[in-house]
């Protein structure tokens, strides 16, 4: 897992350096986001790109056809590089890493709010306002849906984590009981 994260960071950093040198930071941000959405939301395309029996050359041709004249050649090169290294599924992570660098350069931050179900725009706005006021910076909130969460919100902003999930609360309760020397037999099942 850590190797994949390091690789996606390298791709995001490399793309950011190219974008910065060519004054295309915003263009790359928009296009990489669109490519990421298309690949992640198209089940047929994703299955085609992941299929082990389809030659790399065929996959590369399809990518070029799908995105022909719609995206910068550097973005196409990135996607084909990810394909070549069996990492096309990591395109979303590369996008987030790239976006993080753009926001960092502009003094903005991204908070990731992981919930069991999709948050409403109003809920996202409430979190955004509170975080922006607390940290005195413009903050964008990205909602990540993880159906395995029982409930609550797991919020990550840079190195800071606020675990407001039920699982997190149960872990805190277990620690408190252990510190007091309480019986944790039933709590250990969480």
Image (tube, rainbow, N blue to C red):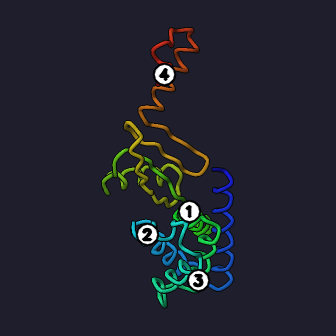
Of circles 1 and 3, the one toward us is: 1
From the top left corner, tell me how far across and down residue 96 is, in percent.
54, 63
Q: Which mark is residue 90?
A: 1
The residue wearing badge 3 is 24
Circle 4 sits in a helix, a strand or a loop, which is it?
A: helix
26 in relation to 86, above or below: below
Instruction: Report the residue marked by disc 2.
Output: 37
**Circle 4: is it few (<14), some (14-19), or many (20+) Cα within 10 Å?**
some
Q: CA distance from mark 1 to mark 3?
A: 22 Å
Q: Is residue 69 above or below residue 13?
A: below
Alpha-carbon distance for marks 4 and 1? 36 Å
The residue located at (48%, 84%) in the rendering is 67
Circle 2 packing at 10 Å, graded few (<14), some (14-19), many (20+), is: some
Q: Is residue 94 above or below residue 56?
A: above
The residue mark sitting in front, 2 or 3, is 2
x 41%, y 32%: residue: 166
- Between the C-alphas of marks 2 and 4, the distance is 39 Å
């Amino acid at each position: 897992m850590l190797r994949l994260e390091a690789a996606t960071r390298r791709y995001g950093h490399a793309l950011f350096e190219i974008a910065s040198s060519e004054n295309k930071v915003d263009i790359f941000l928009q296009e990489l986001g669109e490519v990421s959405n298309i690949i992640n939301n198209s089940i047929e395309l994703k299955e085609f790109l992941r299929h082990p029996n389809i030659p790399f050359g065929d996959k590369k041709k399809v990518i070029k056809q799908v995105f022909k004249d719609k995206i910068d050649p550097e973005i196409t090169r990135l996607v084909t590089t990810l394909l070549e290294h069996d990492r096309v599924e990591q395109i979303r992570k590369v996008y987030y890493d790239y976006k993080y660098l753009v926001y960092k350069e502009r003094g903005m931050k991204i908070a990731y709010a992981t919930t069991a179900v999709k948050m409403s725009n109003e809920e996202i706005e409430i979190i955004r306002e509170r975080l922006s006021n607390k940290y005195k910076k413009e903050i964008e909130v990205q909602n990540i849906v993880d159906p395995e969460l029982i409930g609550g919100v797991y919020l990550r902003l840079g190195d800071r984590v606020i675990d407001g999930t039920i699982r997190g609360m149960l872990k805190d309760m277990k620690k408190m009981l252990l510190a007091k020397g309480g019986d944790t037999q039933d709590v250990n099942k969480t």
